[in-house]
Amino acid sequence: SKAQQKGRSLFFNESINKQVKRDFLIESELREALSKNEFSVLYQPQISVDSGKIVAVEALIRWYNKILGHVSPDEFIQVAEDIGMIHDIGSFVIEQALQDILHYNVKHNATLELSLNISPKQLIETNFAEQMIAAIEQFSFKANLVTLEITENIFISDLDKVQPILKRLRDHGFRLSLDDFGTGYSSLSYLSNLPMNEIKIDRSFINKLLVSSQSEALVKTIIAIGQFYNLTVVAEGVESKAQFERLKHYNCDLIQGYYFDRPLSIIDLHAKYSTHDVS
Ligand code: C2E
Ligand code: CA
Ligand code: CA
Ligand code: CA
């Protein structure tokens, strides 16, 4: 009916209006978030399938704002790229994480590795390689303990720009990981053209691992490809023992996911992994 239609379009307008307001707020609040100290960094353990021990953590940014509450990085990283704030936010994560994990390693006499998500814009539009090298020198951190996770869909347009930057980083000793592997267009050609050390199987495939034989075949194939290229294979989003067992069966190297741990504050990381073993 007309009345129903009117109700629906009113609702529609209202929800659009809400989203526009939220986007506007995210953008304006994001501009001040760094100076207001609203960001923090969490660390999600990566566990070796062979030893059962924690070998690395992935740094994941968090934003809490008084008006907006918790805002997911999936929502604000894109905005940060658009308004040119990704460089400053990226530097914040790099410095905080290097400092936290250096401290962890000194305190526990450990060699925990650190994975950092690097946004395409961050990688291409700044003097990223030099910045990264300066950062580890400042903290006396070893390059071979740092893995840079890069999403594979960035390369399509910028392969020529990306290649020398990655080569410079790799030559300096950093490890390179192809994130969200399998979700992009040319996964395989990247592996032969880029100096990668690692691939991360996207969560969407792990999700369906036990319910879709197609996904299982894909995961099995990705792991085999990784082994063929001599790469470390990481599975993300592992939530159950059954998924873990299946990945172990296919010889996946590292496992990350809620089955072991959610992303942890540095304090919780110290507490839970003070013996450097999985408890
Ligand atoms: P990603 O790199 O694919 O990170 C994995 C995401 O999966 C994280 O979401 C993590 O918290 C979540 N996750 C891990 N294990 C599980 C699990 O077992 N189940 C489920 N349901 N989820 C799991 P998060 O922290 O919300 O980050 C979302 C995305 O935001 C990341 O996806 C990454 O692309 C981006 N991001 C996060 N931190 C940073 C950062 O510091 N810099 C940049 N440039 N991007 C970041
Ligand atoms: Ca990642
Ligand atoms: Ca992913
Ligand atoms: Ca991602």
Image: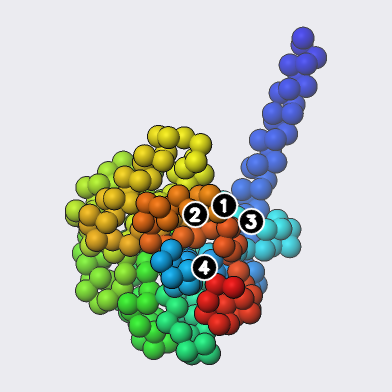
Front of the two marks 3 and 4:
4
Q: Position of residue 23 (x, y in %)?
A: 61, 48
| Residue at image mark 1 | 240
Front of the two marks 2 and 4:
2
Mark 1 or 4, nearer chain start: 4
Distance in Å between CA atoms under marks 3 and 4: 22 Å
Kind of residue sitting beneath label 4: Pro
| Residue at image mark 3 | 71
| Residue at image mark 2 | 244
Q: Nearer the viewer, residue 213 or 169?
A: 213
Q: Nearer the viewer, residue 52 or 11?
A: 52
Front of the two marks 3 and 2:
2
Q: Circle 1 sits in a helix, a strand or a loop, which is it?
A: loop
Distance in Å between CA atoms under marks 3 and 2: 30 Å
Check mark 2 vs ligand 1: CB closer than 8 Å? yes or no.
Answer: no
Q: Circle 4 sits in a helix, a strand or a loop, which is it?
A: strand
| Residue at image mark 4 | 45
Q: Circle 3 sits in a helix, a strand or a loop, which is it?
A: strand
Labels 3 and 4 touching (C-beta < 8 A): no
Mark 3 or 4, nearer chain start: 4
The residue drawn where x is 57% and y is 52% is 240
Q: Position of residue 198 (x, y in %)?
A: 32, 61
Quadrant containing the C terminus is: bottom right
Instruction: Report the residue that reaches farthest toward the top.
Output: 1
